[in-house]
Image: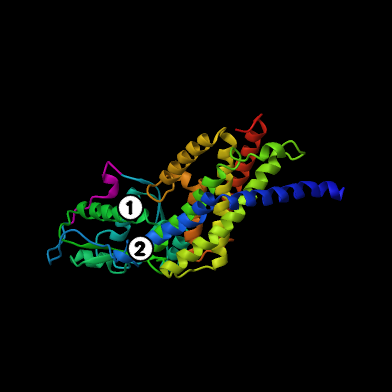
Amino acid sequence: MAEVLTKPSRRIRNMVAKELRLIIKDKVAILLIFLLPAVLIGMLWYVTDSSGMGGLDLGGGMGGGIGGGDDTTNDTTTTQPGDLNETTSDDGIILGIVDLDNSHTYEYDLSENLTAYFEMLVDEIVVFNNTADAYRALYETTIDVYVVIPDGFEANLTINEPTYIEVHYDGNDFLGSSTYSGIIQGATILFRVSKLWIRSEVFPGMVIEFTPGGGFLEAIFGGFIVIFSSYLGIAMTSAQSIVGDEPLRRMLLTPTNRLEVIVAKVIGYVIIGFLQSLLLVTLWVMAFSLELSTSFFSLVIIMSLSALTGSATGILISAVANTRLQANQMFLFVLFATLILSGFFIDVGALNDILPMNQGNALLIDTAFKGLSLLQVLDRILTLCAFTVFAILAATFIFARKPTLG
């Protein structure tokens, strides 16, 4: 009985060894897997170093107001947010509010009135009693941004003195920073216009939290390149693993079943992906002198998970394709679709929580610069594992119904 149970594992082990030998013999594949990602990291290093953009902080220092301050008394127009017929909502944005204002010098609470205008422009408002709770919520990504309304907010506005509100957002949220700034500016403008205050000042100051050590561009865009290279680099080479495997014809004449073939191929490319991950993470961290909030080992695990999903994606492509040309065409489609839907350039909504490269990029950034442990991002890890299992089963189902190999 024990011998029977060991036969599948022995066959898989032999097929993994065969797969590794084939990959190593393919010099072009090795070049694509290891050299090209290193070149991409080198190009980013060259661009940031030669252009003086190294350590650039793309989100900080933003703030501003409209109008100027003087000693003129405010007009006491009392238009409320509900009196406006049109409202604008940015779907999915959750705004935290920390109202520290204890001054009572106006006919109604101005900080609550400003909060009502924020509520018009976001999907949800969460009120916190102190900044520590809001900071923790931002850290755990239960909110996207939070605003601190300081004590004396109402008193300053009543006598036309400038007042400042703090807008805290995640420095790793490349796309969200401009959106949050626009929302805050829009709400403060509506707030002031509703009272015909053309001279009073409300200055939103943008405060960046969790700023990546070593430079924003190198950390965030570099992390994207690392995940992109890991996921799509392995997917590109594994996309040829079935349609380009001539010895596989003879192997299928043995008791080997199709699931064993798929699993062996996935494992073979994951091993290569693990070695690639070691290279990529080492180059990324050392080239830009990044200050990590997690261990190097955790990053390698995340990169290996990304390589696992890339391997499963490529194997699925290879199972669907009948020829090498078809596999190349399908991979190009996956390449462009992955770039467009990566969430790095545009907001893709719910797809951001499903697509493997998006999850891998979020995992890398959250652990590397926010200090989240692997247990704290277990849901995303399980998402990647679920995608891998689905891709393996789908590839096996399709491969099992192919009478011949192209």
Q: Label 1 is placed on what type of residue?
A: Thr
Task: Where is residue 76? Give x, y as percent.
Answer: 18, 56
Between discs 1 and 2, the one toward the N terminus: 2
Residue beneath the point at 57% across and 55% down: 273
Front-lying residue, 212 or 353:
212
Task: Where is residue 218? Give x, y as percent.
Answer: 39, 63
Disc 2 is placed on an element classified as helix
Q: In the figure, residue 238 lies in which quadrant?
A: top right
Residue beneath the point at 18% across and 61% down: 200
Q: Left or right: 116 with respect to 138?
A: left
Task: Where is residue 11? Give x, y as percent.
Answer: 75, 47
Crowding near the residue tagged with mark 1, few <14, some 14–19, many ≥20 C-alpha atoms within 10 Å:
few
Residue beneath the point at 69% across and 38% down: 258
- Which numbered dot is residue 46? 2
The residue mark sitting in front, 1 or 2, is: 2
Q: In this view, does 359 lie above or below 155?
A: above
Q: Main secondary structure of the magenta part?
A: loop
Residue beneath the point at 38% across and 63% down: 45
User: Which residues fall within the magenta stretch?
Assistant: 76-87
Q: Left or right: 399 with respect to 325?
A: right
User: In this rendering, does residue 171 appear at all?
Assistant: no
Task: Give the residue pinned by disc 1.
Answer: 179
Q: Label 2 is placed on what type of residue?
A: Tyr
Crowding near the residue tagged with mark 2, few <14, some 14–19, many ≥20 C-alpha atoms within 10 Å:
few
Task: Where is residue 154? Give x, y as percent.
Answer: 26, 64
- Outermost top residue: 403
